[in-house]
Image (cartoon, rainbow, N blue to C red):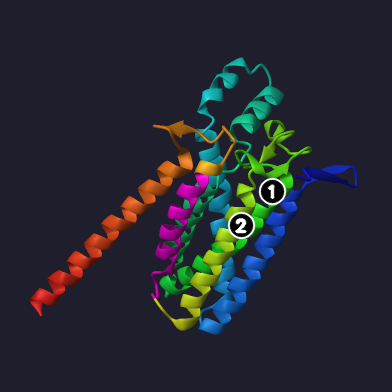
Amino acid sequence: MLGSFTFMEKEIGWYAIAALIGALVAGTFSYQTAKKKGINEVRIVILLLFCSVGVFIGGHLLYGITNLDKIWILGKITNFADFIGGISLIFGGQVFYGGLLGGIAAGVIYAKVTKLERFGEYADVLAAAVPLFHCFGRIGCFLGGCCYGIESDFGFTFHNAVIESANGVNRFPVQLFEAGFNLLLFAFILTLLVKGKLKNRLFLLYMAIYAVGRFILEFFRGDSYRGFLFGLSTSQIISILILVALGVYAIVCLARKSGKAEKI
C-alpha cells in the first residue's frame, strides 16, 4: 500500500518498521509474562535471540527453495557483484513457515545445549508471542504491498507495492485478514496461558490452529512466487505435514498413556 519511504537518503520499507515494532512488542510481552509465570525472564530473552537467528536463516532458506527455478542465474556469474545479485534474487525474501521451523530448531538446540529447565513453560509463553509478532508482520506486508491477495471487487488497489505485479489491481486484503487471525489466536493462547490450561502443550496447539488457518488463507493469496505442488502452495503443503506430524504425535502419546494405564 505505502511501499517504502526515504530517511537520511536511505530507502526504508514499511514492512521493516512493522516487523521491528512487532519484535519489540512480542519481546516485551515475553519478558513480562515470563516474570509473572515465575520463569527466568532473562533466559527467555536469550532464547528469543537464538530463535531469531533460526528465523532469519530458515525464512531465507525456504524462500530460496521456492525460487529454485531461478538457480540458472548462478551459471551466468562472471564476478562477485553478479554472485551477490544472484544470491539476493534467489534467497532475498522470507517465508514465514521457514522462519517458524528455523526458529523452533534454534530454540530446541539452545535448550538442549544449555540444559534449559522448564522448557515447556518457555514454549507456552512463545506460543502467544509468535502470533502477536506475526500480526504486526502481516500489517507490514499490507503496508509494503507484499504477500498480496487475489484480484477482488472487495479490497484495495496498490500503487507503490514492493512487488510490481501487485500494483494497479484491486486486491483482497488477505494480509489484514491474517493479521486479525493472528491477533485472535494470540488472545486465545493467552487466555489458556493465564488460566494454566494445556501446560507445556500450547505451542503445539498454536501450530495446529495456525496450520488450519494458513491453509485456508492461502486460497486468497494472489502472489505466484510461493511455489506450487499438486495445485497447493508450499505453505499449504507444510500446513498439511505439520497437522499430520501433530496427529501422529498425539496418537503416540495416547498409546503411551494407555500402555501405562494397563500396567497399573
Q: Residue at x 48, y 54 (%)?
A: 213
Q: Residue at x 22, y 61 (%)?
A: 252
Determine crowd level at label 1: few under 14, some 14-19, many 20+ residues with C-alpha closer than 10 A.
many
Q: Quadrant of the C terminus?
A: bottom left
Q: Is residue 215 magenta?
A: yes
Give residue 225's position: percent from left, percent from top: 57, 32
For the residues labelled 1 and 2, say whether their Cβ atoms are less than 8 Å apart.
yes
What type is the residue that disc 2 sits on? Ala
Residue designated by label 2: 179
Q: Can residue 48 be seen in this snapshot?
A: no
What type is the residue that disc 1 sits on? Phe
Q: How many marks?
A: 2
Residue designated by label 1: 142
Give residue 109's position: percent from left, percent from top: 44, 58
Q: Which residues are magenta?
A: 198-218
Q: Is residue 100 magenta?
A: no
Q: Is residue 184 above or below residue 66?
A: below
Q: Is residue 205 left or right of residue 191?
A: left
Q: Residue at x 72, y 45 (%)?
A: 144
Q: Is residue 90 left or right of residue 237?
A: right
Query: Is 159 in front, or is 98?
Result: 159
Q: Residue at x 73, y 49 (%)?
A: 143
Query: Is 161 in front, or is 173?
Result: 173
Q: Which mark is residue 104?
A: none
Q: Quadrant of the N terminus?
A: top right
Q: Is residue 173 above or below residue 65?
A: below
CA gap between label 1 and label 2 equals 9 Å
Q: Secondary structure at mark 1?
A: helix
Query: Is 64 in front, or is 234?
Result: 234
Q: Quadrant of residue 6?
A: top right
Q: If you read the primary sequence from the N terminus, does the residue marked by circle 1 or circle 2 appear first? A: 1
